[in-house]
Amino acid sequence: MAKEFLEYFDGMSIGSNDMTQLTLGLDRDSGMVAEGFDERDQSVKKLLQLAIQACKDEDKYIGICGQGPSDYPEFAKWLSDQGIESISLNPDSVIKTWIEIAQ
């Protein structure tokens, strides 16, 4: 479906919170199930991988926003290794995340 989407748009900006919530079927704001909410889940990473590759194949932009890269610098590194073009971060996590990505 990403390829069809990219026929009409210049790229994608993925919300990691929304993608995780929809992929895992969990409401991150529900105390009953929020503990299972994790952007690093393999199923979420697989969908991110597919989206990143689709954008690369079509020479289109792809970025990510959301809490995941700020909470888990190793997740930001993984995204960088996959070829994501931009990562939005909370101000208090920029330095530690840059250090993680640079290693």
Image (tube, rainbow, N blue to C red):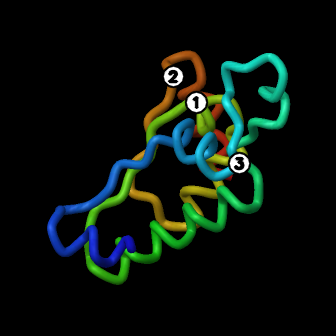
Q: Are marks 2 and 1 in contact (CB under 8 Å)?
A: yes
Q: Which residue is mark 2?
A: 90
The residue lying toward the viewer, choosing from 35 and 87, is 35
Mark 1, mark 3: which one is toward the viewer? 3
Q: Position of residue 76 (x, y in %)?
A: 61, 46
Q: Residue at x 46, y 59 (%)?
A: 84
Mark 3: amino acid: Leu
Q: Left or right: 59 with respect to 33?
A: left
Mark 2, mark 1: which one is toward the viewer? 1
In the rendering, which numbered label is found on residue 67?
Answer: 1
Q: Left or right: 41 with respect to 87?
A: right
Q: Are marks 3 and 2 in contact (CB under 8 Å)?
A: no
Residue 12, by quadrant, is bottom left
Q: CA distance from mark 1 to mark 3?
A: 16 Å
Residue 29, by quadrant, is top right
Q: Position of residue 71 (x, y in %)?
A: 68, 30
Q: Which residue is mark 3?
A: 24
